[in-house]
Image (cartoon, helix red, strand yellow):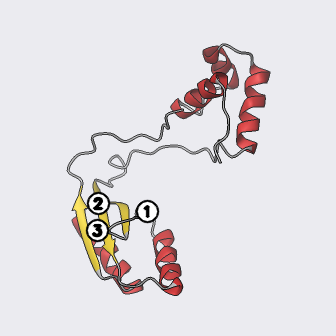
Amino acid sequence: MAVRLDEMDRKILFQLQDDASQSLDEIARKVGSSKTPVWNRIRKMKDLGVIGRQTVLLDAEALGLEACFFVLIRTSEHEADWQRRFLATLRARPEVLEAHRLAGDIDYILKVRVKNARAYDLFYQALISEVKIYNVTALLSMEEIKSTTILPV
């Protein structure tokens, strides 16, 4: 269920998404408030689940993870045990940045970040050794045009 946010909440969320390392004083100044009300609103939004964990964003290419693959998976297996093993396999693989179950002809799409094509093949071989998959199609991203974690608030 969506949480009701006012304009001040939205301004605070924008600032946190832009740079969560800002001090409360900086955020308060930028949103036109004082420190205590901003802190109270942040705490409330954390309690309501609007704000989740805080982390830091790393540059994949700077870390040598230059290849981004989108992996389309079709399966003929839909039993609970298969799905449990498949999801456990995905969660255990650090290369999998995102995994989505889809409606339509493709059952799942994965976003996989690896060093190169050889590293992707190792990932692929490990995946198919863990769970039975009907069809896998890997699409190599040639260029990342837009990537953001900032939600429109």
Going by the numbered disc 2, the residue's amino acid type is Phe
Residue denoted by label 2: 69
Which residue occupies 71% across, 38% down? 45
**Callout 2 secondary element:** strand
Residue mark closest to the camera, 3 vs 2: 2
Is 43 drawn above or below residue 36 in the view shown? below
Dot 2 or dot 1, earlier in sequence: 2
**Callout 1 secondary element:** strand
Residue denoted by label 1: 100
Q: Is the C-beta separation of discs 3 and 1 under 8 Å?
A: no
Going by the numbered disc 3, the residue's amino acid type is Tyr
Label 2 to label 1: alpha-carbon separation: 14 Å
User: Are there few (<14), some (14-19), or many (20+) residues within 10 Å of tag 1?
Assistant: few
Q: Is the C-beta separation of discs 2 and 1 under 8 Å?
A: no
Place of residue 57 in the rendered image (x, y in percent of width and height, measured from the top left):
48, 43
Which residue occupies 24% across, 53% down? 141
Place of residue 55 in the rendered image (x, y in percent of width and height, measured from the top left):
57, 45
Q: Is the C-beta separation of discs 3 and 2 under 8 Å?
A: yes
Dot 3 or dot 1, earlier in sequence: 1
Relative to 144, is 4 on the left or the right? right
Place of residue 28 in the rendered image (x, y in percent of width and height, measured from the top left):
68, 19
Residue denoted by label 3: 120
Q: In this view of the protein, which residue sits in the foreground, 55 or 41?
A: 41
Which residue occupies 37% across, 63% down? 110
Going by the numbered disc 1, the residue's amino acid type is His
Dot 3 or dot 2, earlier in sequence: 2
Q: In this view of the protein, which residue sits in the foreground, 12 or 142?
A: 12
User: Are there few (<14), some (14-19), or many (20+) residues within 10 Å of tag 2?
Assistant: many
Quarter holding the C terminus is top right
Q: In this view of the protein, which residue sits in the foreground, 119 or 107?
A: 107
| Quarter assignment of residue 106 | bottom left
| Quarter assignment of residue 100 | bottom left
